[in-house]
Image (cartoon, helix red, strand yellow):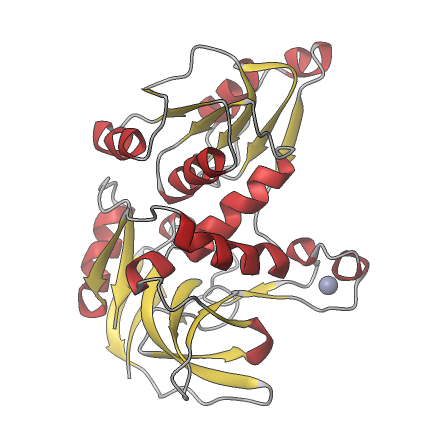
Amino acid sequence: MRALVFTEIDVVSMMDVPEVIAGAGEEIISVTRSGICGSELHGIRHASFRVPPLVMGHEFVGLTSNGRRVAVNPLITCGTCSACLRGETQICPSRRLLGAHLAGGFAERVAVPSVLVHEIPDELEWDRAGLIEPLANALHAWRLGGSPTGQRVAIIGAGAIGLACLEVARHFGASFTAVADLAPERLAVATALGADLVTETLSETYDVIFDAVGVAATRAASIAQLRAGGTTVWLGLANPDAGFDALDLIRWEKNVRGMFAYNDKSFVEAIALAPQLDLRWGTTVPLEEGARVFTELMHGARTPIKALLEP
Ligand SMILES: [Zn+2]
Ligand SMILES: [Zn+2]
């Protein structure tokens, strides 16, 4: 079968790979859409937990062998540690991610544990279903931000995660939503989704700020523009630097929450929420063009905002 493979540092290639085989407790999913994630664009530039050769892709939907339309929660967790028993499976110390620790969705087919497979609503088109995984992140971030209905919310970064955060904030009734990004074409999408303010950099103060970029400047801004006692949720993974004013954080009781993923409950809720949202900022691209699109995005192309590979 055909797959987009991370072959060496900085390189992805389309190639023929062996057909997948379902192990015990697994099923085969015929992939219909598989989103390219910003974490993958950064993740192949240096040695990390993604080890080549690897079929990446953790944001995928598809069909089971008996034709069910499904989304796959890509996080495999142990189910027995204290985090899992608390229901916080997203921070299970032995968590493994499909498409990172194991083969993922940048392929015609993928074998996945059956427990991670969830049916999706009939009315949800594939192009929108392919955005369920970023939406699950946004839903979890909303919770970590204290579910700020009726409050002023800002989002730094109008990529897929940022736009999903915007849709969640508007759906749950934030009183005001601001989106900061350097790319005008991305801000135009935020405006179309109903953001009250779009800007290159935040200047007012907010109750809750989501940093969906993850560099020193955005982390510093996410604290500087927070009201006293407010919360910023850091989801962006662009680099490890922080560079924020710790005394501002201390004097004004500001909260920082790190966030990487979601539990199965949030994933299932994202599936139920998806039909009620716009989710039209994905761009479907044939899998065969995956290497070209991935490489362009890796080298800084600002569009598509979310490429969905279609085998
Ligand atoms: Zn991702
Ligand atoms: Zn666990």
Judge whether 20 appears above or below 57 on screen: below
Residue at point 28% right, 44% down? Answer: 305
Judge whether 7 appears above or below 224 on screen: below
Towards the viewer: 239 or 122: 122
Quadrant in the picture for residue 15: bottom left
Residue at point 22% right, 43% down? Answer: 303
Q: Is residue 25 visible?
A: yes
Towards the viewer: 83 or 16: 83
Quarter of the rendering occupied by the C terminus = bottom left
Whether residue 259 sits left or right of residue 285 in the image: it is right
Quarter of the rendering occupied by the N terminus = bottom left
Whether residue 22 sits left or right of residue 82 in the image: it is left
Towards the viewer: 137 or 293: 137
Whether residue 197 sits left or right of residue 207 in the image: it is left
Q: Is residue 46 visible?
A: no
Towards the viewer: 183 or 242: 183
